[in-house]
Image (tube, coloured by chain):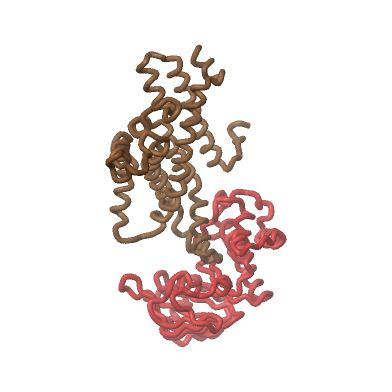
Chain colours: A brown, B red
Amino acid sequence: MQAIQLVAGGDLALYTIVRLSLQVTGVSLLLSTLLGIPAGAWLGLNRFCGRRLVIALLYTGMGFPPVVVGLFVYLLLSRSGPLGGLGWLFTPRAMVVSQLIIAFPLVTGFTMAAVMAVDPELRPQVLSLGATARQATWAILREARVGVAASVVAGFGSIISEVGSVMMVGGNIEGRTRVLTTAIVLETAKGDFDLAIALGIVLLALAFLANLLAVLLQGGLRVPTAECA
Amino acid sequence: MYRLQNVRKAYGGRTVLDIDHLHIQAGEVFAVVGPSGAGKSTLLRLLNFLEPSTAGRIEFDGQPVNDNHLPLALRRQVTTVFQRPVLLNTSVESNVAYGLRLRGERGDGRVRELLRLVGLNELAKAPARRLSGGEAQRVALARALAIEPRVLLLDEPTANLDPYNVGLIESIVADVNRRRGTTVVLVTHNVFQARRLAHRAALLLEGRVVEVAAADDFFERPQDPRTAAFVRGEMVY
């Protein structure tokens, strides 16, 4: 009961946590989308030497355990690490870096699969209608839009709910790097189940909204279906 | 319109097309007949600049086509209707307007007119992916005509279609050639269709041109015994 009051009442601590979660995940997702969709489209459309190796690495990346990513980013950004001079460890930037590493292979891999599923005859046919190479690629991506949208949702789902790496590189500092997942871990450990449940409800709601949006996008935003009538 | 000299196309060392000389005139309906695997579709891909030739010289409208680096404006004067059309996953009218959108044009009036021409004005808003084979091929013909090409390449455009659709598509093609002077290159294994539409015809066999002649001569008085056998409907291999 108290958990619902916390959510409904706009508790300040809760609000700060939700906002930071959305900021970190939002920036990571934006970057992985901007990098991953072109990379996935390129991999799906081109044949080159070493492509299978790249794809095998990509599939491995899609299954990266977040704690391993956290460890890697921690070593990279720690004071004696190669990028220690940036001073990013235990800041939201470090969390963005690790979430980018988790989401990028997912967006790239699913985009590649979606592009490869488009009829290979489409490209010569749109070229024949006068498309430039760029316009043909755009046409293929548009045909693959359901899969491309799914790739972004998969990326979002993987990082909004991820706890291992953000805990390690963010440090779960109150008001600065505490996000939904790390707060749930902490509050549960402290025995403050009301706040933990409140955070869990918000997390579930966000995941649901993202998936609902993806499903609506797939239907071309024509919400009422025959089944509803 | 086209002039081919010693054009050869090979895939992985296997030569599928080997043409000493071929001349396609502006404004004519030129039929290329031959059995499956004769290299007919490969020829159309070269004529549409979709692939470079392995060797030889292709001239389009007096300009040499080398390594596919033809100016976009020239390339956009040629289009193909393929045997199996792949339509975009949007409405019928949006598919017909696609070529115009690529050129930054709108042409709503032309799209409506073409939909009427192919008998699909009532399906303008329907999703293109739900059409029957014949309807889809009519959309493919309409989207090709929307860009008002100077050359229309047809790759077995009516294979697997019912007589109604075959008749409709043939009459539209003949009409476009007559009224607009559009050059048509029709690839088909259907001798009857070639005879109905073509001004001149060629027999392609194992990648080589066996005979080129005016339609009357080609079908009535073929010079080569293989042409005679093919137009009589006998297998030639």
Q: Foreground residue, B159 or A53? A: A53
Tell me, yes or no, if residue B69 can be seen here.
yes
Q: Foreground residue, B220 or A149? A: A149
View extreme (right): residue: B109
Which residue is at 53% across, 41% downward? Answer: A218
Q: Position of residue B199 (x, y in %)?
A: 58, 80
State the image quarter where residue A29 is shown. Answer: top left
Q: Is residue A50 above or below residue B23?
A: above
B84 on left or right of B104: left
Q: Is residue A119 above or below residue A28?
A: below
Q: Foreground residue, A174 or A11? A: A174
Q: Position of residue B161 (x, y in %)?
A: 54, 60
Which residue is at 50% across, 68% downward? Answer: B155
Tell me, yes or no, if residue B219 can be seen here.
no
Q: Position of residue A4 (x, y in %)?
A: 52, 16
Q: Position of residue B3 (x, y in %)?
A: 50, 83
Tell me the quadrant of the picture where the C terminus of chain A can be found. top right
Which residue is at 43% across, 75% downward? Answer: B67
Q: Is residue B117 above or below residue A9?
A: below
Which residue is at 39% across, 36% downward? Answer: A95
Q: Is residue A43 above or below residue A181?
A: below
Number of dots carrying numbers: 0
View extreme (bottom): residue: B223
